Image (cartoon, grey):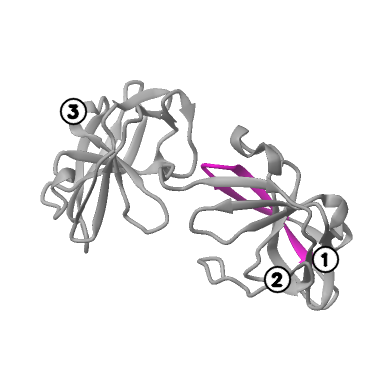
Amino acid sequence: MTVTTSHDIRVEHSRKRIRILLAGQLVADTIAPLLVWEVPYYPTYYVPAGDVAARLIPAGEADDPRLGKAELFTVQVPGGGTADRAARKYPASPARQLHDAIRFEWAAMSEWLEEDEPVYTHARDPHTRVDILASSRRVRVDIDGVTVADSRSPRILFETGLPPRYYLPLSDVRTDLLRPSDTLSHCPYKGTASYWSVDTGKGLHPDVVWIYRTPLPESQKIAGLAAFYDEKVDVFIDEVPQHRPRTKWS
């Protein structure tokens, strides 16, 4: 894997085979995708134009302050499946590797495959590692001065670039204080999480607890365990208060 940068645009060449589907039809199939960090948190796949199978219909232009002027396309596949303005190309980008590459809007496509496995939400970052470790450290979570969880058997999830997350057995959580939420979030490493809000009797705290009921195979160790946003609650590890981390969820 090679890494190049141009005007602060980070681009890497991936060795994975990437396939993109729309309405069950092939949009693109490549063994030479590019990973482009449009935002700091995760990369986006760009596909060599020669590996695109779908019809790309010109649909205007757009400007990006870093990547340059984009040519927009509507994506059309056999059978009538279309995605309006769901592809773009930067033929004059400061990052020369992008001149002949196509970027597809992730959510507009039906399916993304890395090799033969589906991947959700966004491309996996090759520099992100997820470790889930059993621990005997005592983890206590307070909200509004009320102890909402207290466990001596957490699973601690360490993910590159993020604070540790403490996943706790539901038997160690005050489930009587939890209120169901319709919120869902999606992670390419862990799967789909559902949420609870917490009602301490002193206030309602929306979506501060989540659970992966059926996580992806590599994250099975956290199945059925509850985690809290450390950014929004008071966490004590072995009775030592922890500083609230500053992240995009703060």
**Residue 210 falls in which quadrant of the image?**
bottom right
Q: Position of residue 57 (x, y in %)?
A: 21, 36
Secondary element at image label 2:
loop
Query: What residue is disc 3 on?
Result: 50
Magenta segment boundaries in residue numbering:
181-198
The kind of residue tagged 2 is Val
Mark 3 or 2: in front is 2
Question: Residue at image x 26%, y 53%?
Answer: 10
What's under tag 3, amino acid-wise?
A: Gly
Q: Gap in Å between the C-alphas at discs 3 and 2? A: 50 Å
User: In the picture shown, does residue 205 fall above or below 121?
Assistant: below
Relative image position of residue 80 (x, y in whole percent):
35, 26
In the visual, does 169 lie left or right of 48? right
> What residue is at 32 percent from the left and 52 percent from the top?
37
| Above or below 192: residue 9 | below
Q: How many circles with numbers are drawn on the protein?
A: 3
Which residue is identified by label 2? Answer: 233
Q: Secondary structure at mark 1?
A: strand
- The mark nearer the N terminus, 3 or 1, is 3
| Residue 165 shown left or right of residue 76 in the figure | right
- The residue identified by callout 1 is 148
| Label 3: element kind | helix
Membership of 71 in magenta stretch: no
